[in-house]
Image (tube, helix red, strand yellow):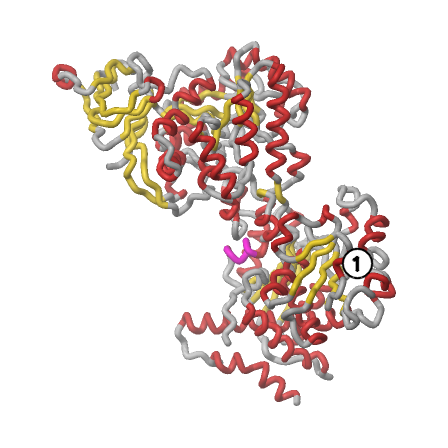
Amino acid sequence: MPFTHRHLLGLEHVSSDDLIHLLDTATSFQEISEREIKKVPTLRGKTVVGLFYEASTRTRTSFEIAAKRMSADFVSLSASTSSATKGETLLDTARNLAAMRPDAIILRHGSSGAPHFLAAHLDCAIVNAGDGAHEHPTQALLDLLTIRERKGRLAELTVAIVGDILHSRVARSNVFALRTLGARVRLVGPPTLLAPELRDWGEVTSDLEEGVRDADVIMMLRLQLERQGKNFFPTVDEYSRYFCLTERAVARAKSDVIIMHPGPINRGVEIASDVADGPYSVIMDQVTNGIAVRMAVLYLLINRSRAEAEGATDSAAPVPAAEVEAAPTRLRRKAG
Amino acid sequence: MSGVVVIRGGTVIDPASGLHARRDVVVRDGRVTEVSDAVGADTLADATVIPAANCLVLPGLIDMHVHLREPGYEYRETIETGTRAAVAGGFTAVACMANTNPVNDNAAVTEYIRERAQAAGLARVYPIGAVSKQLKGEELAEIGEMRRAGIVAVSDDGMPIMNGGLMRRALEYTAMFGLPVIVHEEDRLIAAEGVMNEGAMSLRLGLKGMPAAAEEAMIARDLTLLERTGGRVHVAHVSTAGAVELIRAAKQRGLPVTAEGAPHHFTLTEAAVEGYNTAAKMNPPLRTQRDVEAVRRGVADGTIDAIASDHAPHHRDEKEVEFDRALNGVVGLETTLPLALRLADEAKIPLDTIVAAMTINPARILGLPLGTLAVGADADITVVDPTRGWTVRASGFRSKGRSTPFEGMEMRGQAVVTMVSGRIVWRADA
């Protein structure tokens, strides 16, 4: 099945088939990271630029490792070292990068829609690595991959997402994709961090124990500590009294519940250490799966643009599309 | 142009005199001298005839809410380019907001604007003075001095007057001059840096929302103040159903309040923001279908007195950025007329009501001796071909502003001749 998206801007408009294709591709890449030589030549000669306007350790590292395991060249710029501080606009910065002919730009930006803006103005593939309070599609994909690994499916599962839903791009991407794949979503948080219209997305509650009751998956969100003092809640201490995931709350969920967190964790704020480190926690699996998911995203987007470019110039394609599609299988065979 | 001009065979709509009929309009020495169903042969003999069969002949349209950006922001618009856009859009008079640089908060700036408009020689320009010095919402500007220099209203448009005490004094003080206080109604603390309407759409897009309550709470405050202050309130760009309802109820109580609606608010919903379209970013923001319908009903029943564009040109570089960093505002002078005609058509509003909202009503609100084709009136006339089809292409605008949410939209209706004091200032290509 061809992957027809040019960019990965979000998961809201990605179909069930495409989501599964992304996850299957990621699954086929997982073993590369288990090898002694963790590198395949699939994206050799390709250039991936990471453009990070917000601090990010884990996402940037994960993309970098993913690109390098595929043999792509990876360059990363953060806002403090780029021209952003000199007042250059996002569009100018991105146009300059695009002029250096990268195959993909990975953008993390504090403004919702920033990757959409770049996609409208640039030719290369854009991967959203988190835009404002909008989406963080690769995070949700790695969450989905982790759930599917543990549960064998996504449809009909009950997934409770707990925390600052209103400002969370992780929550949005997960809600959109989980709904597309037939999971039931519960959204849990104080009313100040919810919104009336969330009822269109799933069940909404401000009672943590009620929210996680019989859940298959509990997904905790990181509490942005700077929300304190903006009247979303009085203090972090009071927040954690009501919304910190403790063993007691976990006991309300299904016995085989899995606990997820996109990191970095505020221990004792949104999740108790015992829970984060406990037997239900799959937080480290999420991190590991982030590599395979990002390999899959880069692979599908970059190869798609190559196939398109070759189609457009009508040249005798040295790598037929069919072979490109078959690449992951071939890699697996080679490994075996 | 001297001599006699006859605008012949058009449908004259002049709500001020209750006329809606096929008439010839005779213009002599800058004034309307005759409106009759058959102009005499002797008049026609030495007259310049403008054939207007199948056209509407309207009192010159008045846009009571535009930003001409001069002085200070000439890279966005000048009085010359703005009034060129005005006359191309059928407007013979505009009232321009005070948020220039320097702010129009003193008589010298008021005079400067009037001089520049005189030099441009296109549409009439009526300056609106600031309510507060520097639009800071702290101290009253010299409203009386500006009144002497020619302002027709006061407004801190763009900067809501958060200080209710200042608003009270402004209403009391302007009562002395009979000037309306034009209010941009937004409680900034409730709006909380929102960049679009708050609701299902802002939630999906992850954009900070401005709830309708931010607009409505401020209208409620000002209408409450108006119960005892004297003065007049004119609510700019009404965008929510609740706002329309508050104004309707206040009018029923007999309060001296008027209101205007903008074409984007009665035509488009927040859906236009999809894809983070900064050409659909303005303040107040595009709202929901329910709000659009309420604004339409407000125009239909007269709760909303005037149609005004809130023409707010920006430079491309100020709109071609991340959505939350883009400036608020879109241009409107060249699209308002066809959108008003479309409103009449779609909402089954009599053309007379729409024309009144663009002529005599804003003239009365601002105290202008305009807005009618009665004999003796200044010959400010807009001849409209209501069936002429065209496609919105911002690249062809006379305005320097290019940001419009209507790009590519098919329009019907265009000003074919715009006349100010008997002088033709705009004539569309045939």
Residue positioned 68% across, 24% down in the render? B163
Front residue of this view, candidates A333 and B222 = B222
Number of marks in the image?
A: 1
User: Residue type at mark 1?
Assistant: Glu
Could you say which is closer to the camera, residue B112 or residue B57?
A: B57
**Residue beneath the point at 77% across and 47% down:** A226
**Residue at image location 60% in from the left, 13% down from the top:** B173
B263 in relation to B164, above or below: below
Residue A299, visible in the rendered structure:
no
Please state the horizontal and vertical placement of residue B129, each as a whole percent of the image. 54, 20
Q: Can residue A149 be seen in this view?
A: yes
Q: Where is residue B364 in the image (x, y as percent from the top left)?
A: 44, 18
Residue B348 picture quarter: top left
Identify the element where label 1 is drawn: helix
- The x, y position of residue B408, in whole percent, is 39, 47
A256 versus B358 height, above or below:
below
- The answer to whether residue A195 is left or right of residue B87 is right
Above or below A324: residue B357 = above
Check disc 1 and report the residue beneath it: A209
Residue toward you, A250 or B132: A250
Q: Give the range drawn in magenta.
A: A116-120
Quadrant housing the C terminus of chain A: bottom right
- What is the x, y in percent for residue B218? 62, 29
Main SS, magenta residues: helix
Q: Residue at x 53, y 15 (%)?
A: B179
The chain that hosts pointer 1 is A
